[in-house]
Image (cartoon, rainbow, N blue to C red):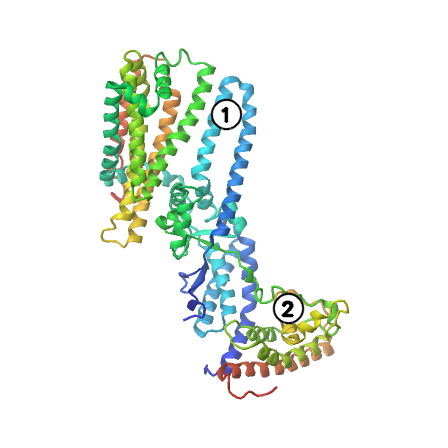
Amino acid sequence: MPQTEEGLVVNRERFIRQRRSDWQRFETLVSRLRGNRQRKWASRDVSDLSRLYRSICYDLSLVQSREWGARLELYLNDLVAQGHNALYRSAPMSLSVVWDFFAFDFPRTFRRRIRAFSLALSLFLIPLLVSTFVGWQRPDVAEMIAGKESLEAARQNFGQELYTGVDAEYAGQRSQMAGFYVKNNTGIAFQAYAMGAFVGLGTCFILLSNGISIGMVTGYILSAGQPTTENFFSFAVSHGSFELTAIVIAGGGGFVLAQGILFPGQRTRMDSLRHHGLESLKLALGAGAMLAIAAMLEGYFSPLPIPASIKYVVGSCLWLLVISYLSFAGRGGPANEG
Amino acid sequence: MSALQHKKVDTRVVVETPEGADFQFVIAGPGKRVIAWLIDRLIQAGIITLVGILKLFLLPFGEAGAGLGVGGTLIISFLLDWFYFSLFEAYWNGQTPGKRAQGLRVVRTNGTPIDASSAIGRNFLRAADMLPFFYTIGMISMLMTRRLQRLGDLVFDTMVIDERREWISRAGGLTANIEAIPRSECPRRFSVPERTLAVVERLFESDRIISEARREEIARPLSEALRKRLGYVDPQPDPHNPHIFFRTQGFRQTLFLLRVLKTFAENPEGTKFAAKDTGDKRPTSVAASRKQLLAAKTDDFVTSELANFLADDAADRGRARREP
């Protein structure tokens, strides 16, 4: 078709006249389908929608290339945008994804990121050990740093058996505490992860401060002697396996995030952010699940009025479980190191 | 190069679809995002209140029930804190109730829909964006990025787009403050051919640089032909405040065309083919159809005249102009 000025204008009008009905049909179809789930769309609607969408994409390209006016272009642009968002959705999550994550993806990511984990572990464990020692040898210093009231309360708490029997009081208090542990501890772990966005400084701060405060309590209780110490350690050993490991893993996730910001390596910075973002998120989510388990253990199992020896046996088994899960789960299996 | 792609000042992002068309998203500004966030916070508060009421039903079960209620509330508030936004965004294709109310949607920066991991990740990083108070970090980050992304958006490669458009109908932006012509004021007929509408629209194209006075001049022949066709007569000035009449008098032709556009472009019932589509209820005698045909012909004449005129005008703007 000759591209004279006149020909162009007439063509444009013919184009609008011919295509207008399709545009309107598309508009009504999209607004009708938008609210519904894709699964519930009628097959006729789907084929209509995709056909109309493709043709409108073509219309938009045509209008753009011929410069047939900004208003028409805006209109078609909007139609395409609406159709695009109606048609393209990400695949729905299924249970198999969750299984794959815990069976393969999470432990593999953990092993891939063992260096970030080691950094987080040293930032958590060293202050913990040092402050335990300080709290044990110099309880007065611990009182100064961590506050006398809370330390006294902890010591009194573990001065005798936590519970004498499993009754309604036990169930009520422990449910309450389990909820508290989920909210508080998992919240801390996710905070430790998210603060990695400030080039890892926030993660450092959370790990150090938690290491110090946990160490202070431990040391202070050690200084109190038996049976407080026995009560405390038999209480902490079981859920500690999941809890402490998970907090450090979440911190490691924060450092992976920071690594993506600070050391992009061969990638562009944006690319590196995306890559490390996803990796670090896996660590944080896995840690979150571990903390949910820890909260249930701490809520219902740890304070049970049973002999300390049983708790130690179960606790060591749990530590072994966590360590072997993180070291061996997902080795071999489908798409190794994928 | 499209006309729109030159405008880099506004918050638009070009995205290429798998179908090969380039189209644009409008990035949502902080105002709408704050309102959406407030709505979501209100909903969260509502859920917590509801749970607080439901908790009372556990009281008859004694201490165990009460404890379970408190623990359950804590768990639910934890889930709301960390997963409310992400689960909605994952299952509602990038929308939360607040975002849906504001017409916002989270998509990836390449325009494809958000997946569950990005949804969870970008909302985990809310904890960082929130610091030190009221999303200060997030706001700073949004000011510094072209796509108005907060930290969570940056790391997980997402952006928030504004889907609600004012000009969703074809002439919406033009005729926002224009009244439609009531049917009673058009005694002869109440339809304008699609083709004429397209020409009118072209006259008001925003990339067309002509002065208002010149536009009025160009509009006159078509406007007068249309008045005749519709049988529309301008109302007399309102004696109580005649200044409105006199103020608009200089642009009565363009104003009329805009009203025509408003009436017929946005109301497909008024246009010819749509009437054909939905089944024309009017009696179609031979005489009537011949009359319509004739009318269409005269219309076509005026329209093509005007179309030529516009093309001419665009081609050699500033040269000696033909007078209509």
- Circle 2: is it few (<14), some (14-19), or many (20+) Cα within 10 Å? many
* Residue A120 showing in the rendered view: yes
* Residue B149 showing in the rendered view: no
Q: Quadrant of residue A212?
A: top left
Q: Position of residue A31 (x, y in %)?
A: 55, 55
Tally of numbered discs: 2
**Residue assigned mark 1:** B69
The residue at 69%/68% (across/down) is B181
From this viewpoint, which residue is outermost toward the right? B239
**Residue assigned mark 2:** B264
The residue at 40%/30% (across/down) is A184
Looking at the rendered structure, the kind of residue marked 1 is Gly
Looking at the rendered structure, the kind of residue marked 2 is Phe
Q: Marks 1/2: CA distance? A: 60 Å
Labelled pair 1, 2 in contact (Cβ < 8 Å): no
**What is the number of the mark on residue A222?**
none
* Quadrant in which the C terminus of chain A is drawn: top left
Q: Nearer the viewer, residue B69 or B275?
A: B69
